[in-house]
Image (spheres, coloured by chain):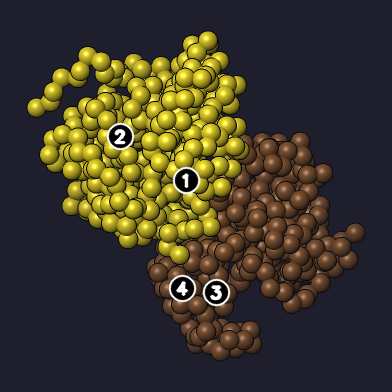
Chain colours: A brown, B yellow
Amino acid sequence: MHTAPTSAMTLPTYNDVLAAHERIGPYIHRTPVLTSTFMNERTGADLYFKCENFQKAGAFKARGAVNAVFSLPEAAAAKGVATHSSGNHALSLCYAAARRGIPARVVMPATAPSAKKAAVLSYGGQIVECAPSMAAREAAAARIIDETDADLVHPYDDPRVIAGQATAARELAEDIADLDAFIAPISGGGLISGCCLALSALSPMTAIYAAEPDNAADAHESLKVGRIVRKEAGETVADGLKACLSERTWHFVSRHVADILTVTEAEIIEAMRLVWGRMKIVIEPSSAVPVAALLKNPSIFAGKRVGILISGGNVDLDRLPWQ
Amino acid sequence: MHTAPTSAMTLPTYNDVLAAHERIGPYIHRTPVLTSTFMNERTGADLYFKCENFQKAGAFKARGAVNAVFSLPEAAAAKGVATHSSGNHALSLCYAAARRGIPARVVMPATAPSAKKAAVLSYGGQIVECAPSMAAREAAAARIIDETDADLVHPYDDPRVIAGQATAARELAEDIADLDAFIAPISGGGLISGCCLALSALSPMTAIYAAEPDNAADAHESLKVGRIVRKEAGETVADGLKACLSERTWHFVSRHVADILTVTEAEIIEAMRLVWGRMKIVIEPSSAVPVAALLKNPSIFAGKRVGILISGGNVDLDRLPWQ
């Protein structure tokens, strides 16, 4: 049983996904779907890896960010965009803004690693430094919006972003027919919401799973108790997966996701290393989370055709988690 | 001016390449050709990466090994194959022999890293241990041949192997028309010889380059003085590139290769890291050698369409060269 969406909550539709796909086409890659005999043998399943690690800016986030930036009317776009996320969403937003020729301002703690700052600058973003707390980040972002009237693009709680992320699952469904199951990492739920929207339209018999670290299992708990559970994530190597669901993403997760599987830190690291070593592709720890879930749950996936969303490949090559 | 081939030296022909391609087709991948906006901007060239790191057993060597193994008549095949190379050629030979269901014996020093031994075993090979010297390896291999009448498959000085490696360049020429230039790493010369054979037939206007480490620059010196220079290689992170040319590979190199470019250890490591970080693919140090040569020589390659052979992706993930 589900509650009706509140009137204030705009949800993207499949038509929004189609519009997003057309809008972002010139600026994103249609990423390849890879297979691996080795991984098939290890899992007993037929696996199809949708490789968003090869996406612009190194992650699926480019899809949602480009859709948000290119959805803006001319006058609003001229004022620029802003975010206080400093991970893949920030890089993607800078990438998108640079394509449109508008400013992107990224609020970051002054204490952020210099590699993160350098990445934002290399994608053409402007850094606005703040004190290292969430309150300071939100205050700094609010001040920027006040001063510039820039559009604050939320990393997941935004229908433009969800419609953009959905295009990854649409491409996968177009390329690989008759998937029995699909699995993606879950954090705030923007990616999985988009995937639910696309797959329920294009491949309604595909069972949709999400995967998350044991140490940030709020979505798993939410699904178990039937309402959003908000709790501080612990430390995890998959540091892109610490956000909590919003009402908007919970709408999709609660209706479409069959189960949310959790994995340990050791399982994430082993899966990441296995993919690097055997598939010869660089994936970030968050992308290894669904792979670890596949390896851990043969009873769910063996004998099936399974799509896996490899979310990104942005890794600090100087600090690999197995070293 | 070139000397005529000696009558004892069998050279593969383009017809052998066609036969090899048909023979190995069921057992190898037609690997993808990747592009990278970032790498194009860094080099000023249009680069086409033929990704043999995604090949079976992790390197182009699978092509030559499969061709050698499946060229054997039934009775000879039953006696198995052997090698005293312990790198990618050994893995590929084990892979090929397992496909045909015949034994592969690999002579390895007892002191070889356990990861290398485990890799040979995981591909179904049998390890024959010997003392850690080239003389001991050759003696052990000779004894195996005496005892078993197995076919000793040389890693490069074998027309079946050269014809097999040639199929990589054939696929590239089929996929990407009008390459102005092509570059591959060079060691004993089996790969580049095959590429010369395929490209001179399919794309005769393509200028063929090879690349090697400064610390193992015997092929560079050979081309400069016009005869094979044999010298002990120094230490290099690209440890797959330490072999010397044979008369058979020199035949192709001396006739077709425009230049052999050399790079330092630091340049190899930087190029390798750049490809991992930006292209999100795992390549081994030997594969980074031609990438480093491209970055170092814009005067040769800028403004051109250039094919690069990424030779393999077998890396010890516990010991990355930048760490």
Please name the amino acid that badge 3 sits on: Ser
Q: Is residue A158 left or right of residue B285?
A: right
Mark 2 to mark 1 CA distance (whole Å): 19 Å
Is circle 3 on the same chain as circle 4? yes
Q: Nearer the viewer, mark 3 or mark 2?
A: 2
Q: Which residue is mark 3?
A: A86
Q: Which residue is mark 2?
A: B189
Q: Chain of mark 3?
A: A
Q: Which residue is mark 1?
A: B313
Determine which quarter of the picture holds residue B247: top left
**Residue B89 percent across, percent down from the top left:** 45, 34
Please name the amino acid that badge 1 sits on: Gly
Under circle 3, the secondary element is: loop
Q: Residues within 10 Å of mark 4 (few under 14, many from 20)?
A: few
Mark 3 to mark 1 CA distance (whole Å): 31 Å
**Viewer-proximal residue, B125 or A81?**
B125
Q: Residue at x 19, y 19 (%)?
A: B5
